[in-house]
Every structure is written in C-alpha cells, then in structure tokens.
Amino acid sequence: MASPPHGRPRRAAPAPDSPAQDSPAQDSPELDSPELDSPGPDGWTLDSWSRHLGRRADPAALAARLTAGSLPEAVSAAAAAAPRRLALRIDDEDVTHGELDDAAGRGAAWLHGQGVRPGHRVLLAGAGSADFVRAYLAALRAGATVVPASPMLTAAELAALCEQAQVTMAFADHSSAGLLAGAASGLPVTRIGPHPGGGTGRPCGPALREVLSGQDPVPAGPADPDAPAILAYTSGTTGLPKGVPLTHANLLSSIRAAMLAWRWNGSDVLVHALPLTHQHGLGGVHATLLAGSRAVLCSRFEPARLARLAGQARATILFAVPAMYQRLTGLPRAGLAPLRGLRLAVSGSAPLDPALARRAGAALGQLPLERYGTTESGLGVSALYDGPRVAGSVGRPLPGVRLRIADPDGRPLPPGEPGEILLAGPQVFGGYLGPAGQAGQAFHPGGWFRTGDLGRIEPASGGVEITGRIKELIISGGFNVTPREVELVLEQHPAVSEAAVAGLPSARWGEEVAAWVVPVPGAAADPAGLIAHARARLAVYKCPKQVFLVDSLPRNSLGKVLRRTLRPPPVPG
Ligand code: AMP
C-alpha cells in the first residue's frame, strides 16, 4: 500500500469532541487576510479553514486535535458523558448512548472469544438498523476492521467481496445472511436487525442479541489511530470496486472537521435515510455518537415519512443526496412544513443541479449546503455554514484539508482554470488495497490524492466548482466536453426533467456527444428541439448529435447517474 507523506503530527491532543472546546472566537478574528487564499511555496492550495472556523487556526495543532484517539475511545467517552440520552431512532427502535456503549463492550468480548484479533476483517452487511450500529461498534472495539457491504449486493457480489477482503466472519441482516448462507462460504454469520417471519426461514447463525447476553463488557482501550477501522469499497461508478482502508485518524478527522464547520453540538438532531454502508450515511452516525447528540434514521427513503419524522423529532440537520431533494421538493407544502425548522440541510455525494438547489431552497426555506467528498478522502469541501450559499459551488476545503486544482502532471493551476481536484490532509487514505499499480496512480508526489474529479476555483468567491469526472470526459474531434456542462443546459429547457450526457463512438469525431433525457410528464420534448436549444447556448462541438428520450436515468443506490452504462435504445423492428 502506498503511504503518502501526510505530515500528520503524532503528538497527543485533548479530546476534541466536547463542544466547550469549539469556541470559535478564541484566536485572531482576522479572516480576510489575502495570504489565506494565495499560492504557497508548493503552488496554489486553498488553506481557508479559518473561514469555516470563524478564527485563525494553527494547522499542526488543528490536525492533532482532529486525529486524536480512536473511534471506540471517542465514542465511549461521549457515551459516558450522556449515557441516558437517546442516540438513535432507526425505523422504530430507540437506543441510548449508554446502551450502545454496553453493546459495543459485550460484542467486543464475544468477538474476542470467537478468535477475532486486531486487524481481522469483519463483514457488516445490510440495511441500517440499531443492530447494525451495535455490531459496528463491537467490531471496532475488538480492534477489527469493518468491511461494510450494501444490502443491494447480489449473492455473487457478496461472495466476491468476502473473498477480496478476506473477511473472517460476518454480521448480516436477514436478507444478506440468506445470500451468504446460499454462497456456502463457510463464513460464520451473526444476524443483525429485524428478522421478518418471527424467526422462521433458513437458519443463518445466531442473532446478535443472543450473543451479547452473558458477556462481560470490554472497556474501550487505547487503539492505534493509524490502524484501519474500515475497509470500504468504492461505489464503482467507474470500473471495478477498489478496497479503501480508512484509519481511525482518517474517519475522525473527516467528521470532526465537518462538525466544527457545521457547529454540531449535543442538542442537534440529525435526520437521514442514507445507507449506513456508505461514508455519507455512516458519517452522520459518527457525528451523532461523537457529539452525544441524536439521530433519526430511516432504512428506506420515503419522502413524506422522512419529513414527518423530522417534524416529530424536531430535527435540526438533514443529510440527503440530490436525488432525495428532488423527491422531497415534490411533496405538498404541508408535507414539507416540518423540514422548514431545520437549521442545516446538507447535500452531497452527487452534483446538485442549481435549478434543483433553488427549488429545494424554496421548499425548505434555505438553500442546501453542499459538501463534497470521496470515500478515499472523506469529507473534503463544504460551503460555509455562515456564508452565502451559491448554487453550483461546493465551497471551501474543510479544516485540515488542502486542495489544489492541477494539470495532468500534478502541477498546480491558478484560480479560474479547470483541472483535476487534488486533496491532501489527515482525512485522506494511504492507498488502495491491492496491486501496487493501482496505488501508484492514486497520488501525485507530496501525498496529493487524485480524486478523478474535474473542477475549478471560482476566482471571485474562492469556492470550488465541480465540473465532472475525468473518466467521463468526452473527447470529440479533439475537443474536451464535460457532460455536466451539457446536462445543465439541457435541464434549463422547460420540457426536460433531467438529462445525462455521455460519449458514443464516432468514426468521424472519435466520440460524439449524446444525451439521454427524461421529459417533464406531459411536456412536449422533441430531440430536434432540444438539439436546437443546446446549439443556441453551447459551442457546436459540445452539442448533442443525438438525443434519446427515456423514462428514467440509470443511478446507483446513492442516486449518482451511471453515465458509463448509458447505451442508445435498441432500434425498433
Ligand atoms: P463516493 O466515493 O461514493 O463517496 O463518491 C465520490 C464521488 O462522488 C466524487 O468523486 C464525486 O464525483 C461525487 N461527489 C461527491 N460529492 C459531490 C458533490 N457535492 N458534487 C458533485 N459530485 C460529488
């Protein structure tokens, strides 16, 4: 595994999760100093953390504070401070911080008894549930590395994941446990979550609650911050999934930076319906457990239910992906009312179309705050909590993160110029698991992670704009075309609900631009009219040569459009 020089200081720092330590105004209030946004000795970086914090921060002290301790220690310390406070309501089950801490200790004792040792890999497969979080915390406290697996994986994908990650045992919900048993891998499986049918069906190992009883809880001892806590697999919108080891320090610094920026505190109530097997949803659980706050989570996304639950719980923060905002904005005004009480609505994991941002802003009473991140580099960039929200901008690097826009050789580019987004800092992983070739391509010298995303720094505001993904770039007649730019123009057309753009092989141009368009129900969208609309607004080489009208776009479980799977519809007859 490549290990880029992050320069993360190793000295101990005070526990950073107490809100008392997060007083913003302790240092110089001098926030507009140009040196914060100017090229440093190693090129253009955007070290503008002070804008998030509301004060100047010493980078070394900040990094030490962000990475201090390990997840089990930090979560257990927060639980000790508020053991009786409700931590999670997931679907209909409530669990307090103290109960989760107790389950983590008992589960770790049981795992040790099963021979699980630090560094062993434990699969955690299934939909979000209180048991999912119990099993997660137990595995971490036992020193194991958790391998999250989406409940949407097929039996073959699960089997391949177990093989690739070399897991030694599994926690799995009813449906994933059935798939694992069917694969006859011999992997010991412990069941988590509800068991539909009152316990009948194929026996797939003991239930978590059975194994926890009769154990003496193990306390959360000191753990190596640089040990892998999670082995995540990228969602694979391009190519095959890759193993991403994330250390305690990576995960803690990622979420703590966002908590500081978003002023997260013990009285916050988060609401979301994101999968816990992905960093976006799991990050919300981390924040809740570290702050001793509360979260109301749904294992399935139903817009009306989510809004109702948010109202009942007096939710203060919403996490959602753009596809969820799209559906939330379709609710009647009365159904949306509970969401108007939020202090923060966060959007991430996929581009938020500016028109949708404005619709969501009107529906919720605030523009969603955009954040940008990747599995490999954690939560990297966020709009300013106190600053103006600009549709189309994901904001500035979060505390501890350094960002650079670079040319293909990794050379920094000035503001305004488009290039690849590179990230460095304690949030960034050390390299992919697997063949050295993969790891080598992931970084430029100096520990700069190549996100594969294209973007630019908007010169006037200093905010980062994401323009597309390198692998999705269309090269037509030698010209570069970013699919997103064309999609945004098509989505301005009143008859277009949403659009996706990709390149098709072309004898003449190498690739030619094609668009897949979902029309607004009842609207008269015609391909020739849409091409004319694009021609009036875009350089000719960017305009679609073909437009296909479709009922829906292919998306993954987080709502990201899978452009690489777009194919022309079969010709009838
Ligand atoms: P994942 O590793 O599944 O979290 O996917 C990370 C990818 O999602 C990034 O490389 C981006 O392409 C995309 N992404 C995440 N957040 C945003 C955002 N706010 N705007 C646009 N794209 C995003």
Image (cartoon, grey):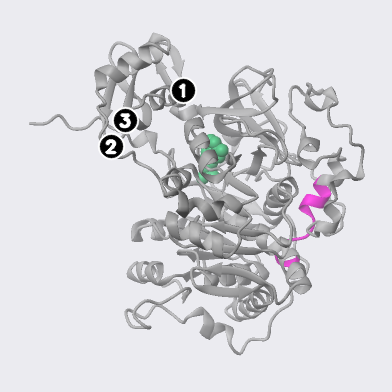
In this picture, residue 536 sits left or right of residue 465:
left
The percent position of residue 264, horizontal first and vertical second, equals 72, 54
User: Compared with residue 563, is residue 137 higher up or lower down, i.e. above or below?
Assistant: below
Q: Amino acid at mark 2?
A: Pro
> Which of the numbered marks, if any, corresponds to residue 521?
2
Residue count near mark 3 (Cα–Cα under 10 Å), binned few <14, some 14–19, many ≥20: many
Q: Nearer the viewer, residue 447 or 90?
A: 90
Q: CA distance from mark 1 to mark 3?
A: 14 Å
Using the image, tell me which numbered label, if any, was put on residue 517. Answer: 3
Q: Which mark is residue 305?
A: none
* Residue range corresponding to the magenta coloring: 63-73
Q: CA distance from mark 2 to mark 3?
A: 12 Å
Disc 2 crowd, CA 10 A, few/some/many (<14, 14-19, 20+): few
Mark yes or no: residue 344 visible.
Answer: yes
- Which element type, helix, strand or loop, lies under badge 1? helix
- Residue type (three-letter) at the residue carrying disc 3: Val
